[in-house]
Image (cartoon, coloured by chain):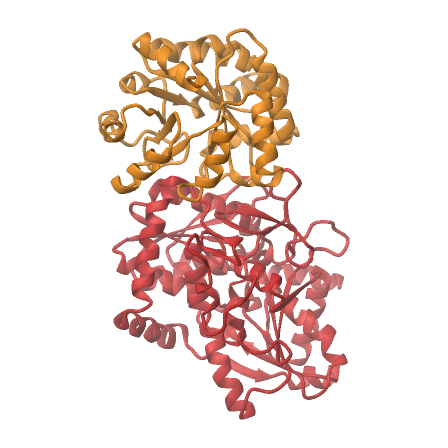
Amino acid sequence: MILKKKVPLIDQHDKYGFWGGKFGGSYIPETLKKPIDDLTISFNKLRKNKIFLKKKNFYFKNYIGTPTRFIKLENLSEHLGGAQIWAKVVSDANGGAHKIYNATVHALICKSMGKKYIVGDTGAGYAGKMLSMAAKKFGLKCKIFMGAKDIKRQKPNCDAMRKNGAEIIPVTTGSQTLVDAVSECMRYWVSNCDTTHMCVGSTVGPNIFVKICGWSTSQISKELKIQIKNEFKKIPNKIKLINCVGGGSSAYGFWSEFIDFPKKQIELIGVEAGGPKKSKLHAAPLSKGAKLGVLHGAASYVCQNLEGQINETESISAGLDYPGVSPIHCFLKDTKRAIYTYATDEEALKAYKLVTKFESLNPSLEPSHAFAEAIKISPKLTRDTIVIVNSCGDAKKDRDILKMRLKTI
Amino acid sequence: MSSPIRVAFEKANKENRPALLTYTVAGDSNKKISLNILKRISDHVDICEIGFPHNTPIADGGQIQTSSYRAIKKGIKINDIFEIVKNYKKIKDAKPVILMGYYNMIYQYNENKFLRKCKESGVNGLIVVDLPWPENINFANKCKKNLVSFIQLLSPTTSLKRLKKIIKDSHDMIYYISMLSTTGGKLKVSPKQILSNYQRIKKIDNKKKCVIGFGITEKNIDKLKSADGIVCGSIICKEITKSITLGQNPVTNVSKLVKKLKKKII
């Protein structure tokens, strides 16, 4: 398994859509073959179309508000000693998280394909909130599929979705979280693919959805590369890019421009959700060695039992609470370009507490997992090491959970 | 030698009616009941489709999901499913069996081992919902080598060009999905339209036996009786659910229902 240089990772798949010959693909019912082929053709044309790109760039700049800040966390670095800790504050983006990039691109694709309806799945509610925003902005009718458990724990985002005129469809099957929301959304699309466009909220699902999402979030590392050069005059010799990984959309976006660099110079660290310290359940297929399986139309490492039934997951962070992971992260793991670890619920909460104590930053529970890793490793590193954390979401949505759980930490 | 699936179609054809295919989930509502259902409906059915339940089904509607979750909750394992097939096949005049499910379960069990078990237990065909053509070509060939028919699915969205290629690679039977829907949706296309699409398929290769499924009920089954075969699934799963809710015997109720369905197409 070899990574190619100078080719975007999203394009390094074979003709059946597999990365490294085994991750990804399109395991879909026959009914979805045509809509997925149509979408693939449209996307391949649009990504080369100057007018479309101009439109995308216009909305990225004026609607999403790029670039997002790249800041040094002076106080946290001082407190921990060791490496310099920086943050890419992606939560500055309109709506408060990286999910807006993918949502905006999907809304633009939907419009250019002449479809008036758009549907999407959501876990933490950010993908749903952003899709509802983009749908409103571009005049599309929007339905969001969300697990009933997540609706309860991410109320602020649900309120936002409804305010934007989207209909939230509660999913009450299975564990009532993201995995069930994605299934239900796909089932809805099977029945309505002639009039409706589907947005998959992360770099998961059939091949084309991995590509569209990765193409959209790569904006993050494009900005970061320029910002690093501006800040340090050149790309420093020791960088660690730390990102949380659920489906893996923000991590891919945060890393895509840096994959070609030697890993000694730029290390990529993905942090999955280890779940509650005392629980056997988790959402960390990469770092806990889950087996290869097929989930939601793609082959990836999946938390599953011996029979191939998908396991229940558990995490304080709804956005990371997913049994599968992007095929491109499986590829990055097996080619050893990125390393993956996990943080427990408790570690993420502690990290949140520490970051917010020292900095005027309010990372949601998802990036708090990444901060947990940064906090863990930074004291042991030298001053010339640049640790950059993608603060990819804002904690407004987590206010209820944080209020309840911080007392116990 | 003709395959048992083909023979079943020929028999129905001689009787001047479509073949009746039923779909039930293995282990719904438990192993014993699902086996008894198969035994009881066997006289009225031409081919039994048996679902191996998966907990993340992306193409099943509510009724089959309910049946699947019920079976999984009771702890059904793949080996139990083969055991059910084996026991069913022991009865006199057992009908051909087609297993239907999602690829991950076959993949985890191991393709070769799965097909070996199919052969051993008497499975005649296989439908893998999320393994479309051309990705399924290798696996379909493996099936053929093991004397298991791989059943290709066709849908209203399948282009003519694609239809031709898929039909060319298909085995004895092909499955036409009546409409854009998960299983058990309300029939939103007229039977006339469905049959016109069906004819388009038959025109490409008249010899391949084509069944119609998705959204078939007591009310519409007779309107599709010019097809080679008709599949009833969700309506049966619904009957099992109803029987359990009412505290009635699902075996008796399903058998009555299947008899009724059969009557409509004679």
Image quadrant for the N terminus of chain A?
Answer: bottom right
Image quadrant for the C terminus of chain A?
Answer: bottom right
Q: Quadrant of residue A371?
A: bottom right
**Label tally:** 0
- Return the residue nearer the eye: A139 or A209: A209
Figure chain in red: A
- Return the residue nearer the eye: A116 or B71: B71
Identity of the residue drawn at 60% across and 20% down = B84
Q: Quadrant of residue A329?
A: bottom right
Identity of the residue drawn at 29% across and 47% down = A195
Q: Position of residue A45 (x, y in %)?
A: 29, 63
Give the colour chain B carries in the figure.
orange
- Return the residue nearer the eye: A299 or A315: A299
Depicted A310 relative to depicted A224: above or below: above
Q: Position of residue B87 (x, y in %)?
A: 61, 15
- Return the residue nearer the eye: A278 or A5: A5
Identity of the residue drawn at 29% across and 32% down = B188
Q: Position of residue A179 (x, y in %)?
A: 54, 48
Depicted A200 relative to depicted B122: above or below: below
Q: Does residue A129 appear in this view?
A: yes
Depicted B159 relative to depicted A391: above or below: above
Q: Does residue B76 appear in this view?
A: no
Left or right, A280 with respect to A360, comes to right
Q: Position of residue B171 (x, y in %)?
A: 40, 29
- Name, please, the residue furthest toward the bottom: A233
